[in-house]
Image (tube, rainbow, N blue to C red):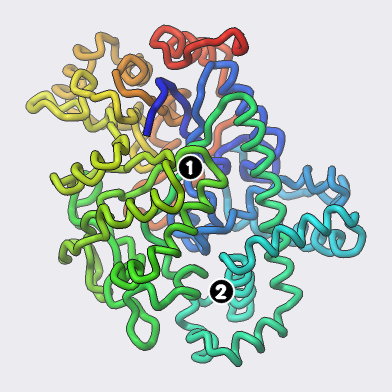
Amino acid sequence: MKLERSSGILLHPTSLPGKFGIGSLGKEAFEFIDILVTTRQKLWQILPLGPTGYGDSPYQSFSTFAGNPLVIDLEKLVEDGLLSTNELDTQEHFGDKKVDFGKVISFKYPLYRKAFKNFKASCCEAEKLAFDVFCKEQNDLWLDDYSLYASLKDHFKGKQWNEWDEDIKLREAHALNKYREQLTEEREFYKFLQYEFFKQWGAVKKYANSHKIKIVGDIPIFVSIDSSDAWANADLFFFDEKKNPTKVAGVPPDYFSKTGQLWGNPLYDWAKMKKTGYAWWINRIRSVMSTCDVVRIDHFRGFSAYWAVPASNKDAIIGEWEKGPGADFFHALKKALGDIQVIAEDLGVITPDVEKLRDEFGFPGMKILQFAFDPNEESSYIPHRHICNCVIYTGTHDNDTTSGWYQKLTEKEKKYIQEYLDVREEDVTWGLIRAAFASTAKMAIIPMQDVLSLGSNARMNTPGAPSGNWQWRFSKEQLSDTIKDRLKKLTTIYRRNQLTQQDD
């Protein structure tokens, strides 16, 4: 993959400012793109866009193909005549610093149902035709299964699919036919939500691309057990006859956790995947690439080998490394999709076989500056050791903010960082941003929290913490002209955006 020297910001759409308790795909998304343009950025990195379940994690989605309805912009629905302005009036108080997902769901879904009712009753023929085309294109790939799955989740009061009645859990033909007929209206409602999501996201992406901004998407290697993907494709995973996983995904003890991370995702039966030519995976990546320009593959090392934990275990300490599909998968992917722009998330326990797989296909890996500064040992993450074919970050969604991380270091570590960056303590965050931009790494991406120099209370995710994650939002007032000018200046100094006459 050929990289251009560029920079950008990591910010999930849920973290955008705006009304109704959560970021959306409305005017604030377009205004954020305008900010990227003003500061001469070229990249907007997001987290996975799927509908989230328990814990609100984008990495534990109800579908790897579907979009998250919670970011559908209500004011766009008003513009389209599906809601009235009065219907958006609410006495509900939404905080502007954190997402209260429960409150947002309770507020938005009744309005979505009103919009759906109005869509069916009075939408113009052209819009109905567009909806029918969308459904026809997506039904066999994922939409039919997802809309039925989402309807069944409601029917069975939110239970995980392997706790449903036996016949539909096992997808017996008579049960599928019965529920498809019984839940016709609900299935169409969930298809409508997906139509609106992809219409709105498509407009956002088109606007970004028209301003030479690339969207960097994110695809988790694994899917959630509580997903339409696992239910509709159970034969591709390691399940027992009752459709319970026999072994699940995680990582062994590492920097983030002394007991490892027990993710709980079902593991793929790669031998069966190979027999299909990796068809499900190829469809998955093709679908994700329709929503972004570059894709970061989370936990890339799992394609070489993955940590398999017995499903009955309480943590990820005990497990074993099992062989992934390796180069065979990526050759099949390239044959089907050509050269796509991939970033390999190669953090954690990285062995020579993982590096070989990454380098064979020319995928850039990731460098995290928060991992770089050990005063006793030189790290491969330190800027003077970077290669060009990599993507540098101050931190990721799993890290503390740079300010919060720095405050927790020892005095010896703090002194080393200050000396290396040649900055005072109060300017360490921007010192790291400068080091990232100055690096030889072709791409530099900074979390919005670090651009704003925020502390630990703005952290997006704490791995292993069962609640309180994924909630952070920024407000327009935080992003001052001074900060924007500073970001633009560094971008220009370190040639992260080579200006053309058209850009000027």
- The kind of residue tagged 2 is Gly
The image position of residue 257, as x and y in percent, is 23, 50
- Give the class, few, some or many, for how many residues have Cα within 10 Å of label 2's Cα (few <14, many ≥20): some
Q: Which mark is residue 61?
A: none
Q: CA distance from mark 1 to mark 2?
A: 28 Å
Q: Is residue 407 visible?
A: no
Of badges 1 and 2, the one in the foreground is 1
**Quadrant location, the C terminus:** top right
Residue shown at 27%/57% (left/top)? Answer: 261
The image position of residue 442, as x and y in percent, is 35, 23
Residue at the farthest left position? 376
Say which residue label 2 marks: 158
The one of 489 and 181 positioned closer to us in this rendering = 181
**Quadrant location, the N terminus:** top left
Residue shown at 22%/54% (left/top)? Answer: 304
- Of the two numbered discs 1 and 2 on the same chain, state the one appearing first in sequence: 2
